[in-house]
Amino acid sequence: MQNSPQDLRKKILGRSGESLTCKYLKKHGYKILYRNYTTPFGEADVVAKKGDVICLVEVKTRMSDAYGVPAEAVDRAKQQRYRMIAKFYCAFVGEEVPLRFDVASICDGELTYFENAFI
């Protein structure tokens, strides 16, 4: 089944948000380890490292805030998925590592970055 034009626009918008987030992170001294890190529990948009801390970053991109600020879309279910992704990542690397959950909220091309957005 083909993607609808609306689905394709959402994918393009999401990818552009991820690219903007990666540029921001690199500019602020992070190393990008993975984009679209896929696990059985879901996908982390960006996995980055700064110092010895691994950051799992959820990127939310919107054209406007007509339906709320993008970061508000990171609900409890999404946070729980990221916790499971973190456990999978630690198993993948074979050790417990310092982890942090961040959110990149992009609205109309403007990025707001939230470190330690949730626990």
Image: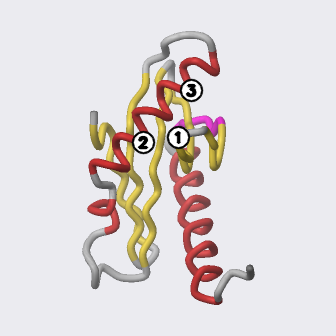
Q: Position of residue 84 (x, y in %)?
A: 45, 33
Q: Nearer the viewer, mark 3 or mark 2?
A: 2
Here the colouring is secondary structure
- Mark 3 and 2 residues: CB-CB less than 8 Å, in contact? no
**Helix or strand or loop: what does disc 3 sit on?**
helix
Question: Is residue 97 or residue 113 the one in the foreground?
Answer: 97
Mark 1 closeness class: few <14, some 14–19, many ≥20 residues within 10 Å = some
Residue farthest right in this picture:
1
Residue pictured at 41% horizontal, 67% vertical:
106
Mark closest to the chain's N terminus, 1 or 2: 1
Q: Amino acid at mark 1?
A: Phe
Distance CA(mark 3)–CA(mark 1): 11 Å
- Determine crowd level at label 2: few under 14, some 14-19, many 20+ residues with C-alpha closer than 10 A: some
Could you tell whether 40 is left or right of 110 in the image? Answer: right
Q: Which residues are magenta?
A: 29-33
State the predominant SS element of the stretch in magenta. strand
Whether residue 32 is in magenta: the answer is yes
Badge 1 vs badge 2, beta-carbon distance below 8 Å: yes
Residue 81 has which mark? 2
58 up-or-down from 93: above or below:
below
Q: Secondary structure at mark 1?
A: loop
Q: Which residue is mark 3?
A: 89
Q: Residue tagged by mark 1?
A: 41
Q: Which quarter shows the N terminus?
A: bottom right
User: Where in the figure is residue 101, as x and y percent of width and height?
Assistant: 38, 37
Disc 3 versus disc 2: distance between alpha carbons? Answer: 12 Å
- Which residue type carries mark 3? Tyr
| Cα gap from disc 1 to disc 2, whole angstroms | 6 Å
